[in-house]
């Protein structure tokens, strides 16, 4: 499922999985997350954690695009995290990673040049030294 949201000339499309019925997933001990075959949990974010990805509506191929995410933990900026963008496009056989820098407290920016027009999937990976490991998927339309 994609939730399309537009505000202040920015557009975000977070991707969330919905399982109906058995779905073949396993419930964790707390009953609200599923695990993939590697045992990595997918589901709701950790308590107090929030991720806000701001995407420009007009992403053009062949140009560097800044990708920025704001992270918070307990309503405070989450600083000194390791944030990476995993960018894929199966039609174009693309699977690349973009590193980020913390440009402000809790704000992480990385640049990526989308070489061709199309629909790209981007997974934001967040880790820190306190054991936090979160990710969120977004779809990016490139003109």
Image (cartoon, helix red, strand yellow):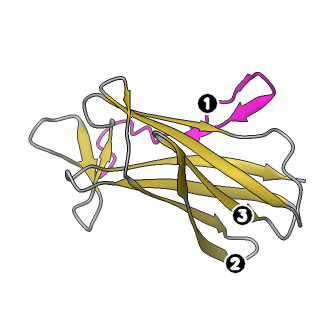
Residue that appears at 90% across and 53% down: 143
Q: Magenta residues?
A: 1-24
* Among the two numbered marks 3 and 2 on one chain, the one whose residue lies closer to the N terminus: 2
State the image coordinates of residue 60 (x, y, percent, origin top left). 89, 55
Residue that appears at 71% across and 58% down: 120
Circle 3 residues within 10 Å: few <14, some 14–19, many ≥20:
some
Question: Which secondary structure, mark 2?
Answer: loop
Question: Which secondary structure, mark 3?
Answer: strand
Say left or right for 38 vs 51: left
Front position among marks 3 and 1: 3
State the image coordinates of residue 126 (x, y, percent, origin top left). 40, 53
User: Which residue in the structure is indicated by mark 3?
Assistant: 112
State the image coordinates of residue 139 (x, y, percent, origin top left). 66, 48
User: Which residue in the structure is indicated by mark 2?
Assistant: 93
Q: Which mark is residue 3?
A: 1
Q: CA distance from mark 1 to mark 2?
A: 25 Å
Residue that appears at 30% across and 59% down: 36
Examine the residues drawn in magenta and state their main secondary structure: loop
Front position among marks 3 and 2: 3
* Among the two numbered marks 1 and 2 on one chain, the one whose residue lies closer to the N terminus: 1
Q: Which mark is residue 103?
A: none
Total count of labels: 3
């Amino acid at each position: 499922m994609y939730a399309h949201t537009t505000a202040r000339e920015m557009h975000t499309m977070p991707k969330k999985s919905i399982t109906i019925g058995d779905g073949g997933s396993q419930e964790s001990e707390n009953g609200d997350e599923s695990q993939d075959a590697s045992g990595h949990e997918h589901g709701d974010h950790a308590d107090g954690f929030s991720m806000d990805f701001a995407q420009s509506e007009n992403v053009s191929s062949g140009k560097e695009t800044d990708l920025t995410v704001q992270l918070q933990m307990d309503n405070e900026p989450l600083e000194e995290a390791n944030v990476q963008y995993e960018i894929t496009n199966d039609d174009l056989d693309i699977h690349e990673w973009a590193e980020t820098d913390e440009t402000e407290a809790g704000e992480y920016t990385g640049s990526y040049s989308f070489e061709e027009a199309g629909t790209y999937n981007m997974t934001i990976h967040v880790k820190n030294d306190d054991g936090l490991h979160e990710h969120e998927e977004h779809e990016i339309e490139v003109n």
